[in-house]
Amino acid sequence: MENVKLITLKERMEELGLSFMAAGFDSFLEEQARNENTLLDRIYDLVEAELIPRKERAGKTRLKISAIPQYKTLEAFDLSWLKGGLTQEKFNELSTLSFVERKENVFFLGPSGVGKTHLMSALGCKACISGYSAYYISCHDLVESLIKAKEQNRLSRKLKWFAKPNILLVDEVGYEPLNAEETHVLFQLINVRYETGSMIMTSNKTFGRWTEFMNNDEAVATASLDRLLHHCHIVSLQADSYRMKDRMKVGAVGFD
């Protein structure tokens, strides 16, 4: 009779969508038989058996949807390599992802190779695992996508789509100058996300050069920066090439 009840109970779990709970139920019962947990503790452990792997699976799904090109972690970033621009205190603050809850932006500035994309990707990956939605795209591909949507009379729908993620990761902002139409659609995106969700951007352009980047349109450049920087963590990285640091350490590349 006990075996019948056990089989039936596991079938009920499956029917309710509690597949992880059902799969681990036998081992759960064996574990509980070896301890003296209270009924509340046992119920708690049983629910955790379903919740933890379900969260892990959801996190993996969010990571896949995010289009972040490589899985990066904050722990793998060598903060000691930097010569300035990011303190341990600021690094720890960003690591908490509290800026996401407050819908604040993060701007990583600096020359090529100092770790801007690593930091952005690592924050995006951690956000996905922590229950937030994120989406990665280069500035070039973003603008191209918006222009294509505009040509198909669905720009409004596309802007709403880019407004959905908790964090929008925009890489390589300013690497290529924009024309008038591209400048306009990028501003529209910035305006749509203003105070509705976080953006993390990387750029090799100082803010003083944004007019040049945005088709020499000072009014639009100023309006864009006004929205981006209103609630923003600005991190100006100073370092030699982060990509070359390990090779330099073993002497494969000189410092001259």
Image (cartoon, rainbow, N blue to C red):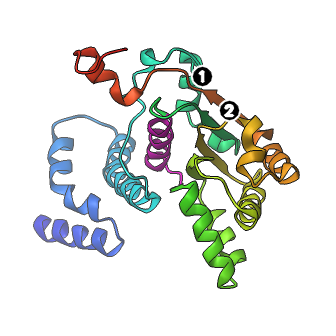
The residue carrying pointer 2 sits among few (fewer than 14), some (14 to 19) or many (20 or more) residues within 10 Å by Cα, namely some
Name which residue type carries label 2: His
- Return the residue at label 1: 90
Q: Is residue 156 above or below residue 139?
A: below
Residue ID at (68%, 69%):
159
Name which residue type carries label 1: Lys
Callout 2–callout 1 Cβ contact below 8 Å: yes
**Nearest to the observer: residue 37 or residue 61:** 61
Rendering coords of residue 200 (x, y %): 60, 44
Q: Earlier in the sequence, mark 2 or mark 1?
A: 1
* Secondary structure, magenta segment, majority class: helix
**Nearest to the observer: residue 58 or residue 185:** 185
Rendering coords of residue 118 (x, y %): 44, 37
Question: What are the residue bounds of the magenta stretch?
Answer: 116-135
In the picture, measured across the screen, residue 93 lies left or right of residue 249, that is right
Question: Element type at marker 2?
Answer: strand
In the picture, measured across the screen, residue 138 lies left or right of residue 213, that is left
Q: Quadrant of residue 18?
A: bottom left
- Return the residue at label 2: 233
Rendering coords of residue 116 (x, y %): 51, 35
Q: Quadrant of residue 252?
A: top left
